[in-house]
Image: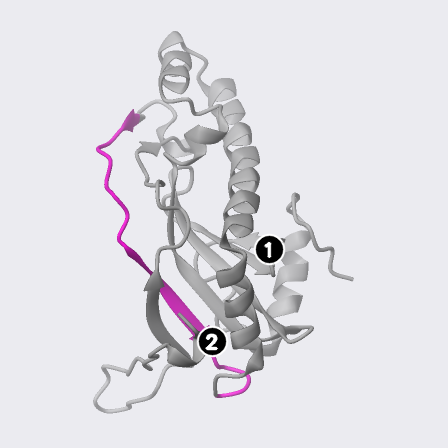
């Protein structure tokens, strides 16, 4: 769907005494990527001794699209540039993110084994292929994409948002420019940063690895 044909709405405050408009716009788009991903496995530090596999829940046919307008107050060419690049190159976004998540799950499995190395855990990992790229798809669920009203080269920054089986509490928000990863945070960590978004990402880069764009 072309950007100018998207029907955005602005959420309203429920506070009747002090109503306000939230600084973002919302709509839905078809689920172009991560169509075969859903959280079946929860394997995180709190549950290394209590893990299991749930039923497969097919993902919804649509995903959330949010446009942050905190800096400019309106949709602009950065939103459109980021949206167009994503729509035209969706498979490359999925591949880069799945590769990134595979590294994360490898680290998580190593931590689980170090904490509680049992035949049961080893059999669980092997049964569900958690140590393979395909196993990542059993531990992630894409919830949507957020477009920001500033960026570089008339292509706005974005975040790709996920629930994940190795951090159910916080989820994942991956800040990107085009299909390149800048930083990782918890869900909504990069929203409502205004023009301080890059500073927040730079701080996150100080204690994470695996990103593609190094901020000066």
Residue nearer the viewer, 171 or 16: 171
Q: CA distance from mark 1 to mark 2?
A: 19 Å
Q: Quadrant of the N terminus?
A: bottom left
Q: Give coordinates of residue 78: x percent, y percent.
A: 57, 77
From what the image shows, is residue 67 above or below residue 182? below
Task: Report if residue 114 lies within the magenta region.
Answer: no
Please give the name of the residue rendered at 36% of the width and 22% of the height, measured from the top-left corner. Answer: 128
Q: Quadrant of the C terminus?
A: bottom right
Q: Give coordinates of residue 34: x percent, y percent.
A: 40, 46
From what the image shows, is residue 16 above or below residue 63? below
Task: Report if residue 59 lies within the magenta region.
Answer: yes
Please give the name of the residue rendered at 43% of the width and 25% of the height, measured from the top-left corner. Answer: 130
From the image, tell me which residue sits under label 1: 179
Residue nearer the viewer, 155 or 125: 155
Please give the name of the residue rendered at 53% of the width and 46% of the height, measured from the top-left corner. Answer: 97
Residue 170 visible in the picture: no
Which residues, given as a range, are shown in magenta? 52-73
């Amino acid at each position: 769907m072309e950007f100018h044909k998207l029907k955005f709405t602005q959420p309203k405050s429920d506070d009747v005494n002090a109503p306000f408009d939230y600084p973002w716009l919302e709509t839905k788009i078809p689920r172009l990527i991560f169509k075969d991903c859903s959280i079946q496995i929860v394997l995180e530090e709190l549950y290394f001794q209590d893990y299991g596999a749930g039923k497969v829940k097919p993902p919804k046919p649509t995903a959330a699209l949010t446009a942050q307008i905190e800096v400019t107050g309106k949709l602009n060419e950065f939103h459109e540039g980021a949206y167009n690049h994503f729509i035209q190159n969706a498979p490359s976004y999925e591949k880069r993110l799945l590769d990134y998540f595979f590294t994360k799950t490898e680290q998580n499995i190593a931590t689980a084994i170090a904490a509680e190395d049992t035949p049961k855990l080893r059999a669980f990992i092997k049964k569900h292929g958690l140590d393979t790229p395909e196993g990542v798809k059993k531990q992630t669920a894409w919830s949507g994409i957020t477009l920001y009203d500033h960026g570089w080269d008339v292509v706005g920054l974005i975040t790709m948002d996920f629930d994940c089986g190795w951090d159910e509490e916080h989820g994942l928000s991956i800040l990107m420019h085009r299909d390149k990863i800048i930083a990782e945070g918890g869900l909504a960590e990069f929203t409502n940063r205004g023009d301080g978004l890059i500073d927040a990402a730079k701080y996150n880069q100080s204690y994470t690895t695996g990103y593609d764009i190094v901020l000066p």
